[in-house]
Image: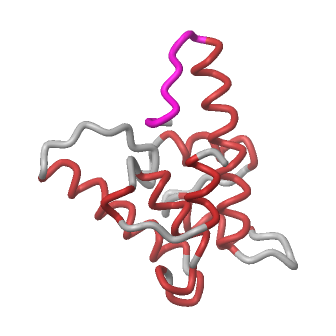
């Protein structure tokens, strides 16, 4: 089994996480442990804190989840842009029968797939730093 798939299926210690996407996979696995009531705004706040911690500790890691960052701009294609950021917009426009967190992870999977395809096409394969 591939390490990424194993991590997606089981909880791991933070010391094993390589990047923000590993953290997000743990949130996907056990959302109730990480996010009260499935609030994407709480998740967005956690991600901003994650990014600030990277800066404080001088860690250079690509980060796409600022409220007006690459992920937010990517969502524009679905009419999901807002001055309030990606979390508020997904929560506002979530389809009936889908939770905001489910919608976020569906968008995240599509975003990562497109980003990885673009990296491969551009000759920049970075599986650990998508």
The x and y percentages for residue 115 are: 61, 31
Q: Nearer the viewer, residue 77 or 127?
A: 127
Relative vertical location of residue 121 with respect to residue 53 in this rendering, above or below:
above
Q: Residue lying at the far bottom in this picture: please name it.
A: 37
In front here: 5 or 31? 5
Left or right, residue 100 beside residue 49: right
Horizontal side, residue 83 vs residue 15: left or right: right
Visual colour scheme: secondary structure
Tell me what residue is drawn at x 47 percent, y 71 percent: 43
Does the magenta portion include 49?
no
**Which image quadrant is residue 13 in?**
bottom left
- Name the residue at 37% across, 37% down: 62
Q: Which residues are magenta?
A: 122-129
The residue sitting at 39% across, 55% down in the picture is 17
Number of numbered discs overlaid on the protein picture = 0
Q: Position of residue 18 (x, y in %)?
A: 38, 47
Residue 54 spot, x, y in % from top left: 22, 50
Q: Residue furthest front?
A: 1
Q: Is residue 33 above or below residue 26?
A: below
Q: Is 41 rendered above or below residue 113?
A: below
- The residue most toward the right is 97
Please state the horizontal and vertical placement of residue 69, each as a whole percent of the image. Answer: 45, 44
Quadrant position of residue 103:
bottom right
Which of 2 and 40 lies nearest the eye of the viewer?
Answer: 2
In the figure, 85 relative to 76: above or below?
Answer: below
Q: Is residue 126 left or right of residue 51?
A: right
Main secondary structure found in the magenta portion: loop
């Amino acid at each position: 089994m591939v390490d990424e798939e194993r991590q997606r299926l089981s909880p791991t210690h933070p010391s094993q996480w390589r990047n923000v996407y590993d953290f997000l996979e743990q949130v996907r696995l056990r959302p109730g442990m990480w996010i009260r009531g499935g609030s994407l705004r709480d998740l967005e706040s956690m991600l901003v804190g994650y990014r600030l911690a990277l800066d404080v500790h001088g860690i250079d890691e690509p980060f796409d989840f600022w409220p007006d960052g690459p992920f937010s701009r990517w969502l524009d294609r679905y009419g999901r842009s807002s001055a309030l950021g990606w979390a508020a917009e997904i929560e506002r426009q979530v389809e009936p029968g889908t939770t905001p967190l489910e919608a976020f992870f569906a968008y995240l999977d599509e975003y990562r797939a497109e980003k990885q395809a673009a990296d491969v096409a551009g000759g920049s394969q970075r599986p650990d730093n998508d």
